[in-house]
Image (cartoon, rainbow, N blue to C red):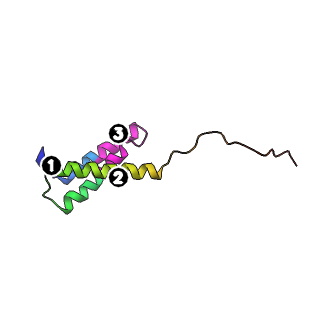
């Protein structure tokens, strides 16, 4: 298992699988994990030699940052009805 986490294509496959799950389950739940796994491809390629716990900790941190970034980018929009204070028929 430890050797698999050091392969870049494993992280790419995980990112793809998580992105597909996100399409099936709405709500930006798995998209942060998919982005974290996609960034892990670059981390594994740039600096090989991390241990499995370190890779999982980096993945968790990157996923959390991606999820927070998505929440900030796609803030919940108000679905409430618009309140009209002035009637267009008033002169």
Q: Which residue shows up at 45% across the image and 52% down it?
A: 72
Residue receiving disc 3 = 21
Q: At which x and y percent is residue 45?
A: 20, 60
Drawn side of residue 89 relative to residue 1, left or right: right
Residue 15 x %, y %: 29, 48
Mark 2 and mark 1 in contact (Cβ < 8 Å)? Answer: no
| Neighbours of disc 1 within 10 Å: few (<14), some (14-19), many (20+) | some
**Which of pointers 1 and 2 lies earlier in the amino acid sequence?**
1
In the orientation shown, which residue stands out farthest toward the right?
Answer: 91
Q: CA distance from mark 1 to mark 2?
A: 20 Å
Which residue position is annotated with label 1?
52
Number of other residues with Cα within 10 Å of mark 2, as a class: few under 14, some 14 to 19, many 20 or more: some
The residue furthest bottom is 46
Q: Nearer the viewer, mark 3 or mark 1?
A: 1
Magenta-tinted stretch? 15-36
**Most distant residue in the front direction:** 85
What x and y, as percent, mark residue 70? 42, 50
Q: Nearer the viewer, residue 68 or 13?
A: 68
């Amino acid at each position: 298992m430890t050797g698999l986490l050091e392969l870049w294509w494993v992280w790419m496959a995980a990112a793809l699988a998580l992105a597909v799950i996100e399409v099936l389950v709405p709500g930006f739940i798995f998209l942060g994990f998919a982005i974290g796994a996609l960034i892990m491809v670059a981390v594994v390629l740039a600096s090989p030699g991390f241990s499995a716990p370190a890779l999982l900790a980096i993945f968790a941190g990157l996923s959390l940052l991606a999820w927070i970034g998505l929440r900030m980018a796609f803030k919940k929009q108000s679905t409430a009805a618009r309140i009209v204070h002035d009637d267009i028929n008033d002169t």
